[in-house]
Image (cartoon, helix red, strand yellow):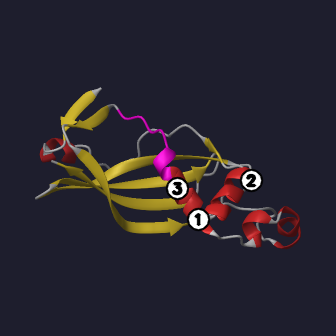
Amino acid sequence: MENIRFDDVEKLRSKISKDFGAWSKPIAVTQEKIQQFADVTGDHQWIHLDVERCKRESPFGGPVAHGFLTLGFVAALEIENDWQVTGFRNVVNYGANKLRFISPVPAGASVHGHNRIIAVEPKPQGTQMTVETNVHVVGNDKPALIYEGIFLYVK
């Protein structure tokens, strides 16, 4: 495992790539998780929860996960790299440049993701890294979600 200090901007920039890294382990998207997310957020739309109605009326043929539930899985993805950022005090989720919900995630499917570094910039508080993560339903070439997150590694 290669250790790269958070303030070694040039070394971190060497990790910028047009290619995505390895896939994460899959995460099961169960109807129970969808229900729990609906209960926490108050988003009880039938397209997520009413299995029988979805079979009859939904263009997807069954319930689908909320887009923001799919986004929430980004934090749980176990993506292994052959390098890691070290020496920082903490890392802060600074926001996003891009978020797109491209295709549905059916209840009962599994998702996995992979990412790539697209920018590294020094900031007064530390180093800012922009990471693009694509989440796919396992077996689908088209992503379900594209997320460009901004993270600040704090001195």
Residue 5: percent from left, percent from top: 17, 38
Indicate the secondary structure of the residue bearing disc 2.
Answer: helix
Number of numbered labels in the structure image: 3
Residue placed furthest toward the top: 1
Mostly what secondary structure, the magenta segment? loop
User: Which is in the foreground here, disc 1 or disc 3?
Assistant: 3
User: Which is in the foreground here, disc 1 or disc 2?
Assistant: 2
Q: Nearer the N terminus, badge 1 or badge 3?
A: 1
Residue 30: percent from left, percent from top: 71, 49
**Rounded to the nearest whole Å, what is the CA distance between mark 1 and mark 2?**
14 Å
**Rounded to the nearest whole Å, what is the CA distance between mark 1 and mark 3?**
9 Å
Q: Nearer the N terminus, badge 3 or badge 2?
A: 2
Residue at horizontal 44 percent and vertical 60 percent from the top: 147
Q: Residue beneath label 2, please?
A: 31
Label 3 Cα crowd, 10 Å radius (few <14 / some 14-19 / many 20+): few
Front in this rendered view, residue 114 or 108: 108
Front in this rendered view, residue 116 or 128: 128
Q: Residue beneath label 3, please?
A: 72
Q: Which residue type carries mark 1?
A: Gly
Q: Residue beneath label 1, please?
A: 67
Q: Does 14 sit above or below residue 145? A: above
Q: Which residues are magenta?
A: 74-81
Q: Are marks 1 and 3 in contact (CB under 8 Å)?
A: no
Task: Give the left or right position of residue 43, taking residue 120 as reference.
Answer: right
